[in-house]
Image (cartoon, rainbow, N blue to C red):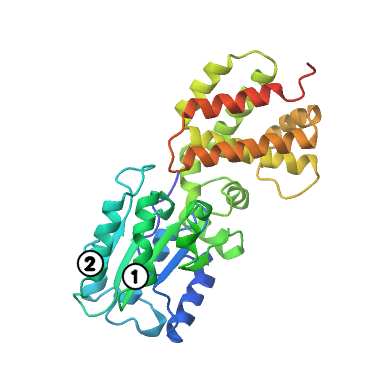
Amino acid sequence: MISRLKPYSFKPYPWQLENWNTIQSATRAERMAHAILFTGPVGIGLEYFSKCLAAGLLCDNSGDELQACGGCRSCHLIQGESHPDLVTIEPEEAGKQIKIEEIRRLIDFMQLKSQYGRYKISVITPAESMNRNAANSLLKTLEEPPGQSLLILLCHRPNLLPITIRSRCQQLRFKPAYDEATVRWVKENIETDENVQHLLTMAGGAPLAIPEMLENNIFEYQRNLLNDLFALKAGQEDPVKIAEKWKAYDTSHVLFWLSQLFSDMVRIKSLAKPVRISDPSMIGRLQELIKQLELHELTGFYHLLLENYGMSTGTISYNSQGLLEDVIIFWQNLNDPE
């Protein structure tokens, strides 16, 4: 079972404190940039961190520490997602693009005078969803920002952002978290009988990704994928039917978890640590596959998985089943004596 996460408190998560200290230091030194790019893996809490920062900047009582009081008019409006000096731009639907019309709306908003006499704050999430026209229309605002304004871009895949955008923003990277404070937070906030350290490793150090992993029964999910790989290798399953089955799971999720499996296989083959898989039975089955393949074959397949995963989560539309069939055909041809 997964517990309900604690309500919004205006305090960053434990694994975000180093980044929070960086922001506080910039504020005290009056070096706060007009545009900040937050980057990090999905599940690291970029959106929550941006809300904490916005609350601290707009709060009537926060001071240089940026700790929002939670009781003033601005804090109540932020809690109700109705503050007139804070706007969030995001795709109309998950996986869709942010279009130029939305960025124009943001630009118009930024030019207005603050209603409460403090900052005008805009958040774009995920920033990599901006199409080319939208990103280009933002450049002038980045180069000539209005006074007392802050533009926050949240991005999980900064390589998809144009260099013209990245170069005009102060960048703050959120690193994967595996430390004791993070482990303690997971134990206190997420109900699970699984080994928390192993869960964090499987989540790539992104604690907020763990609830979805558990809801999707990730361990059974990975075992099913592994069974399919064995069946495909033995010629016991139709590749097209397996691709249809995986597509029903969700193409990007399948490619992500396959990439995790093969990352572990590469690590096992090369005697590197750590590995994400904690199920001894799965490790044993992985060893069977590893014995059949050379390291360069495993790494080649792993890079294909990463490439297709990138395409499945990018802003350009690809044929989902085609991406999966591409992976399956490559897999079947590995170590083929013919």
Q: Position of residue 318 (x, y in %)?
A: 46, 33
Q: Residue at x 56, y 65 (%)?
A: 181
Mark 1 or mark 2: name the one nearer the start of the chain: 1
Q: Amino acid at mark 2?
A: His
Query: Tag 1, which secondary structure?
Result: helix
Residue at mark 1 to residue at mark 2: CA–CA distance: 10 Å
Q: Nearer the viewer, residue 212 or 101?
A: 101
Residue under pointer 2: 83
Q: Are marks 1 and 2 in contact (CB under 8 Å)?
A: yes
Viewer-closest of 182 and 161? 161
Q: Give how far across and how far down residue 211 sits, in percent.
A: 47, 47
Give the residue type that dot 1 points to: Ala
- The spot of residue 20 in percent (x, y) is 48, 73
Q: Residue at x 42, y 85 (%)?
A: 30
Query: Residue 272: in sight, yes or no?
Result: yes
**Extreme residue toward the bottom, this view:** 29
Foreground residue among 117 and 33 = 33
Q: Which mark is residue 7?
A: none
Which residue is located at x 54 percent, y 17 percent? 240
Above or below, 331 against 151 in this view is above
In this rendering, position of residue 225 left or right of residue 168: right
Secondary structure under the numbered disc 2 in the rendered image: loop
Q: Is residue 51 visible?
A: no
Q: Residue at x 27, y 68 (%)?
A: 110
Residue 54: mark: 1
18 left or right of 282 in image: left
Left or right, 221 with reference to 56: right
- The crowding category of the residue bearing disc 1, from other C-alpha atoms within 10 Å (few below 14, some 14 to 19, many at least 20), is many
